[in-house]
C-alpha cells in the first residue's frame, strides 16, 4: 500500500503513478478538502453530480423498487447519500451492512461500501458473501454498538433481474428507522445534487477478515455466528435437541432465501435435527423463481408436506430476509395472530423470558387474541400502526417484551426486528416443554381464551387509482357509520387509525381504516406500503367466539358475514374487478 503525505509540495510525487489513469483531478480535490493535510492511501474521493428522483419515499419497510429501477445510474447512490446526509455524528463510527442475497445484492454492497468510506464511516461490518438476515443485522448493530445498519432486501417480494430490490436503514437500537428519520431521508432525496464515493476496487466479500476501502476498515464477518449465539442464550438448546433427536419430525422451508445457512447451522448442526430438515436451504439470487413469502399460497412446497397423510409434527417457513415465520403443525395452520398470543402466554416456559413480560404490543390489524393474554397476565397491550418501526420505542423503554403482526411477524426485545427463526425456536422450546402437538397447544389456548377468528384477504396488483377510490369511498362513510346496523352487526366505531407514540409523542395518521362492531368483530382496510406494482389492498377480518363448541370451524366460514359486509361497504369486487383475493391467510 502506498502512503504519501498529501500537501501541495508532494502532490506530484503522490500522483506519479496516477497521472496516467486520470486520478490526478480527484487527488487535487482531496488536497483542497484536507485541512490539515492527511494521509493518502490510494484513495480518492469523487464528488459526483446528480439530480433527484421523485419516487424515493420509503414505505412500510424501506425503499422498495423493481431491480431495473435500482440499476438506473445514480438511483441507489442518491438514496444512500440522502441517508448519510440525514444523519449526524456518525463519522468514524461503525456501520453494519448486509442483505438477503437477492439479485443486485453484491454490486449494491460494493457501491455502499465505497460511499460509506467517502462519507467518513470508520468501520463497516459486512456479512460474508454480503449475507445478513434482517434480525441478524439488528443483532450485530446492537452487539457492536454500530451507529446504524443498511439492510438490502425487498423481504417477501420476488427477486431476480426483473424482481424487486430494497434498501432499509436501521438506527442504533438495531431497529428500522422511525418515521422522522425516513422522512428526513426522503426530504434529502428531493434536493440531492451530488454524492461522495471513493475510487477504489471491489473487495472480496467471501473471505472473512479485515480489509480496507479507502480510509474505512471493512470487516467481513460470519453471517450466522453472533445471531446463533444470541439464540442459544434465549432458548433451552438442550431440551430442543432432545426433542429433535427423538421421534419428533420437523421440516423447515427456507424458500431459497436468507435463512438457509442460519437454519442449517442452528437446527441441523447445533440442535441435531436430521440432515435435510432444512429444505430450499440454498440462498438463490432469484429465490429459485419463487415468492419468498411464508404463507399458505407461496410456501406451497411446505404446505404440501405438512398437509399430507404422513406429515411431520412441525413445519415452519421464513421469508426473503428471515424476519417472518409461518408455523404449521401436522395438518394444522397456526394463524400468526394466534402465534403471537401463544408466544406471550407461554413465555415463562422459555429461559430468556422466565421472569415474565413487561408488556406486549401488536399492530392494529393484528387480531386481539394477544390482548386477551395480556389482560390475564395483568400487563399492558399496545396497539401500533403496521410496520416494525413502531415497536422500537416501546421495546427501548421496556414497556413491552414481545410484539407481533398478523403478517407472520413475531419478535421480542432481543433485537429490534421481527425474527423468523426466533419464533421457530420459541415454538420448538414450547413443544419440548409441553410435550403436546401444535394442534393441541392451539386448541387448548382457544379453550382458555376463546377464539379470535381471523383472516387477511390480499388483492395484489390492483389499479392504483381504483384502490384509492375504494379507500376514499370507505373513508367518506366513516362519520355516518357509528350506530348504524350493517346486517346483523351494529357499528361501534369507524375511523382512520391514528397513533400517538407513548414515548416520543410523534403522531402517525391514516394508518388503516377500521370499522368495529359492538360484538368485538372488526374489519380493517389498508393499502400495502411494500409493493412495487400497482396497489395491494389488504382486508383484515376478525370476530370473537368464546364458545368452545364453535371453535372447530373454518375461519372463512366463520367470517363469511363480515366478508360479505366488507364487500358491500367498500365495493371491493366492483372496484378491483376481482372475484377472489390473490392470497387468503
Ligand atoms: C407488510 C406487512 C407488515 C410488515 C411489512 C414489512 O407491509 O403487512 O406487517 O411489517 O410488510 O415486512 P404492507 O405495508 O405491505 O402491509 V417485511 O418481512 O416485508 O420487511
Ligand atoms: Co421480511
Image (cartoon, rainbow, N blue to C red):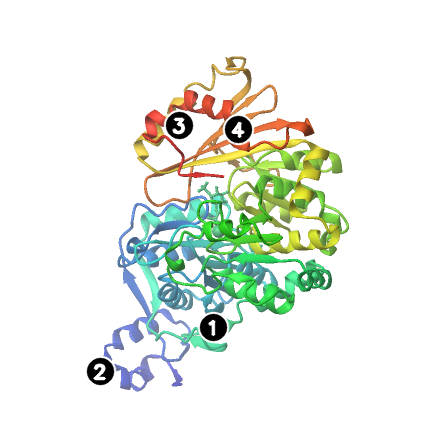
Binning the other alpha carbons within 10 Å of mark 3 as few (below 14), some (14 to 19) or many (20 upward) gives some
Q: Determine the secondary structure under disc 1.
A: strand
Residue ID at (39%, 59%): 288
Callout 3–callout 2 Cβ contact below 8 Å:
no
Q: Position of residue 97 (x, y in %)?
A: 47, 63
Q: Which residue matches tag 4?
A: 557
Binning the other alpha carbons within 10 Å of mark 4 as few (below 14), some (14 to 19) or many (20 upward) gives few
Mark 4 and mark 1 lie on one chain; the one further toward the N terminus is 1
Q: Quadrant of the N terminus?
A: bottom left
Q: Position of residue 224 (x, y in %)?
A: 56, 67
Mark 3 and mark 1 lie on one chain; the one further toward the N terminus is 1
Q: Determine the secondary structure under disc 3.
A: helix
Q: Which residue matches tag 3?
A: 471
Identify whether 272 is placed above or below 382. Answer: below
Identify whether 260 is placed above or below 485. Answer: below
The residues bearing labels 4 and 1 have C-alpha atoms spaced at a distance of: 55 Å
Q: Position of residue 287 (x, y in %)?
A: 40, 58
Q: Hey, which residue is sitting farthest right in the picture? A: 355
The residues bearing labels 2 and 4 have C-alpha atoms spaced at a distance of: 75 Å
Q: Determine the secondary structure under disc 2.
A: helix
The residues bearing labels 3 and 1 have C-alpha atoms spaced at a distance of: 47 Å
Asked if residue 399 shows in the view, the reply is: no
Q: Which residue matches tag 1?
A: 218
Nearest to the eye among marks 3 and 1: give it.
3
Of residue 556 and residue 397, the one placed in the foreground of this image is 556
The residues bearing labels 3 and 4 have C-alpha atoms spaced at a distance of: 25 Å
Mark 2 and mark 4 lie on one chain; the one further toward the N terminus is 2
Amino acid at each position: 500500500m502506498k502512503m504519501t503525505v498529501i500537501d501541495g509540495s508532494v502532490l506530484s510525487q503522490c500522483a506519479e503513478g496516477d497521472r496516467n489513469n486520470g486520478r490526478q483531478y480527484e487527488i487535487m480535490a482531496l488536497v483542497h478538502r484536507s485541512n490539515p493535510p492527511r494521509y493518502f492511501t490510494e484513495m480518492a474521493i469523487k464528488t459526483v453530480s446528480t439530480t433527484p428522483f421523485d419516487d424515493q419515499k420509503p414505505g412500510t419497510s424501506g425503499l422498495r423498487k423493481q431491480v431495473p429501477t435500482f440499476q438506473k445510474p445514480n438511483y441507489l447512490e442518491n438514496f444512500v447519500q440522502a441517508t448519510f446526509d440525514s444523519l449526524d455524528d456518525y463519522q468514524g463510527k461503525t456501520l453494519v451492512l448486509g442483505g438477503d442475497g437477492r439479485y443486485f445484492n453484491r454490486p449494491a454492497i460494493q457501491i455502499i461500501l465505497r460511499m460509506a468510506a467517502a462519507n467518513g464511516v470508520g468501520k463497516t461490518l459486512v456479512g460474508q458473501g454480503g449475507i445478513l438476515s434482517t434480525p441478524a443485522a439488528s443483532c450485530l448493530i446492537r452487539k457492536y454498538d454500530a451507529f446504524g445498519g443498511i439492510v438490502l432486501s425487498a423481504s417477501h417480494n420476488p427477486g431476480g433481474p426483473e424482481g424487486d430490490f430494497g434498501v432499509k436503514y436501521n438506527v442504533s437500537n438495531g431497529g428500522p428507522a422511525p418515521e422522522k428519520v425516513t422522512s428526513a431521508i426522503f426530504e434529502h432525496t428531493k434536493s440531492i445534487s451530488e454524492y461522495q464515493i471513493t475510487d477504489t476496487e471491489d473487495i472480496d466479500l467471501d473471505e472473512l477478515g479485515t480489509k480496507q476501502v479507502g480510509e474505512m476498515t471493512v470487516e467481513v464477518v460470519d453471517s450466522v455466528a453472533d445471531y446463533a449465539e444470541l439464540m442459544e442464550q434465549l432458548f433451552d438448546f438442550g431440551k430442543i435437541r432432545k426433542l429433535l433427536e427423538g421421534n419428533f419430525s420437523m421440516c423447515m422451508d427456507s424458500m431459497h432465501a436468507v435463512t438457509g445457512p442460519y437454519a442449517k447451522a442452528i437446527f441441523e448442526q447445533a440442535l441435531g435435527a436430521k440432515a435435510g430438515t432444512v429444505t430450499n436451504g440454498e440462498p438463490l439470487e432469484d429465490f429459485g423463481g419463487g415468492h419468498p413469502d411464508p404463507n399458505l399460497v407461496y410456501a406451497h412446497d411446505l404446505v404440501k408436506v405438512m398437509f399430507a397423510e404422513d406429515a411431520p409434527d412441525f413445519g415452519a417457513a421464513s421469508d426473503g430476509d428471515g424476519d417472518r415465520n409461518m408455523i404449521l403443525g401436522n395438518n394444522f395452520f397456526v394463524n400468526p395472530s394466534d402465534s403471537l398470543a401463544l408466544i406471550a402466554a407461554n413465555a415463562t416456559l422459555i429461559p430468556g423470558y422466565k421472569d415474565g413480560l413487561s408488556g406486549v404490543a401488536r399492530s392494529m390489524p393484528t387480531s386481539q387474541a394477544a390482548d386477551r393474554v395480556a389482560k390475564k397476565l395483568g400487563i399492558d397491550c399496545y396497539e401500533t400502526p403496521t410496520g416494525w418501526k413502531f415497536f422500537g420505542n416501546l421495546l427501548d423503554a421496556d414497556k413491552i417484551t414481545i410484539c407481533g403482526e398478523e403478517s407472520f411477524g413475531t419478535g421480542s426485545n432481543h433485537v429490534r426486528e421481527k425474527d423468523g427463526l426466533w419464533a421457530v425456536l420459541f415454538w420448538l422450546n414450547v413443544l419440548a416443554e409441553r410435550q403436546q402437538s401444535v394442534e393441541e397447544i392451539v386448541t387448548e389456548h382457544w379453550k382458555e381464551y376463546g377464539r379470535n377468528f381471523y383472516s387477511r384477504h390480499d388483492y395484489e396488483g390492483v389499479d392504483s387509482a381504483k384502490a384509492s377510490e375504494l379507500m376514499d369511498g370507505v373513508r367518506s362513510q366513516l362519520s355516518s357509520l357509528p350506530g348504524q346496523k350493517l346486517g346483523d352487526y351494529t357499528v361501534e366505531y369507524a375511523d382512520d387509525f391514528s397513533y400517538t407514540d407513548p414515548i416520543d409523542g410523534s403522531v402517525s395518521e391514516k394508518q388503516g381504516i377500521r370499522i368495529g362492531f359492538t360484538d368485538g368483530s372488526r374489519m380493517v382496510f389498508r393499502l400495502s406500503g411494500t409493493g412495487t406494482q400497482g396497489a395491494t389492498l389488504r382486508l383484515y377480518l376478525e370476530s370473537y367466539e368464546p364458545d368452545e363448541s364453535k371453535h372447530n370451524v373454518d375461519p372463512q366460514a366463520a367470517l363469511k358475514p363480515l366478508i360479505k359486509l366488507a364487500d358491500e361497504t367498500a365495493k371491493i369486487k366492483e372496484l378491483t374487478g376481482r372475484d377472489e383475493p390473490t392470497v387468503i391467510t
